[in-house]
Amino acid sequence: MAWGSTKSGRLLYNVAVVSAAALTLWLSFSVSVAHVYKDRQPTTSLGWWRSADALVAVGTELVANGETARAPEVATMMREALAQTPVNPGAVRNLAVAEGLVGNANVSERLFRAGETLSRRDLQTQLWHIESCVARDDIGCALTHYDRALRTSLASRDILLPVLVQAAEEPSVRQELLRLISSKPSWRVPFLDQVADNSPNSEAVFRTLAGGQLDLADTAEQGLFVRALWRLIKINAYQHAFELYRTVRPPAAVNQLLRNGGFEAESAMGPFEWQFSEEPDLSATRVQSNDGEGETVLSLVADNGRGGSVARQVLALTPGRYRLSFRTGNVSAEQAGQPLVELGCIGGVSLARMRAPLSVQSQTTSLMLEVPADKCAAQSFQISLGAAGTASQPWIDAIELAKIQN
């Protein structure tokens, strides 16, 4: 089977950089080595002291530069290094590359396999094993060596994690990847971080993050999860975003058409929960009502001429007719102090727009709206205040959406 002949193989094979002039493992491997060592500058002259370390450093530079003509010289130097230190993974690896460059593929393979028995920490040896596994279309084998490289070499992450992000788009690879990261290797969170930020495939983001064993009690991992939700919203993958959100909240909360409309709970999980403005002159804050009932309401503040959105939430309403209701109070006679409630299709038409009635006392407002079947896959619910000349602190509570059954 040709290398990378399957889609899965092609994705995993991207770790090799193959030139049009030399379609061989050995040159592609040397290019990979050159990338790994791009920030290192070992001396090209051994000088008077031919220590094993110096020999390996020079040999590494020569194979990294792809100097095929000097491969026999490298092989001689590596044998000299091994005579000094028989257990020397770097010398074995350079010797393996040198033998491959002169066409001794079988000898090279035996050396690479022997090198891994000496140490699993040699990145270039792991890269060779990855390519060898891909040549056999053995995804599990390739991922095993990805795992070993990523666990033992921080430098490998710049090379390998972007490849795994791309590979996660393929379901068969993703399944094996999720099985691998279920053991929570040290590279799990950096990998998921790159998936959340960089994968162009919304299904891959959804399924990888959903199966990524994230600990949402950990602030950093929760932040990663929320960032993935926002990224899916940004690329208009609303259904995948909502399905990912559903994996971390109980059905009773998720199935509400508008979540936490009474503001009883904290909102910490991104776009499908409340996002509050927290600026000094423009804010929304959960407080206890002063009407004697002790309920939690959302106090809205606009001061010093500030105005704008103070609270918003992304919804995932299906087409149909709905009744929207909410309760407000402490609404001043100044129009700018009247909370404005809006619901509209994201990037599309407005579905509802109403100001709270002028009343210091509690007042309930309701209206009907219809979500269209086209161009309204997700909606934005928003509460705003105008630029009042003086401090305005109305409140809102008991926001409810109910679908009207025909």
Image (cartoon, grey):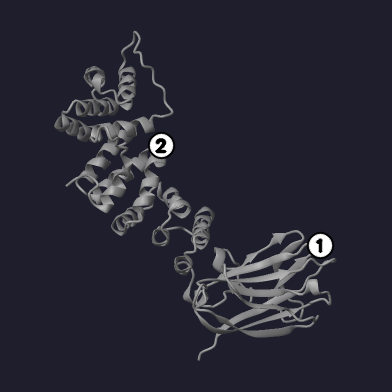
On the picture, is 386 further left or further right than 35? right
Question: For residue 155, which numbered disc appears in the image?
Answer: 2
Residue 238 placement (x, y as % from top left): 48, 67
**Secondary structure under the numbered disc 1 in the rendered image:** loop
Q: Which residue is mark 1?
A: 305
Q: Which residue type carries mark 2?
A: Ala
Instruction: Residue 310 in the image: state x and y as whole percent.
Output: 69, 66
Say whether residue 262 is left or right of residue 52.
Answer: right
Locate residue 183 relative to residue 374 in the image: left or right. left
Q: Position of residue 107 (x, y in %)?
A: 15, 30
Q: Quadrant of residue 179?
A: bottom left
- Element type where label 2 sits in the image: loop
Q: Nearer the viewer, residue 195 or 289?
A: 195
Crowding at label 1, few (<14), some or many (≥20) Cα neighbours within 10 Å?
A: some
Q: Is residue 295 above or below residue 249?
A: below
**Residue 110 location (% of width, % of height):** 17, 33
Q: Residue at 55% of width from left, 68% of height from top? A: 272
Task: Say which quarter of the image contains residue 54.
Answer: top left
Q: Nearer the viewer, residue 64 or 43?
A: 64
Label 2 and label 1: CA atoms lie apart by 52 Å
Answer with mark 2 or mark 1, whichever residue precedes in sequence: 2
**Identity, as a three-letter code, of the amino acid under mark 1:** Gly
Q: Nearer the viewer, mark 2 or mark 1?
A: 1
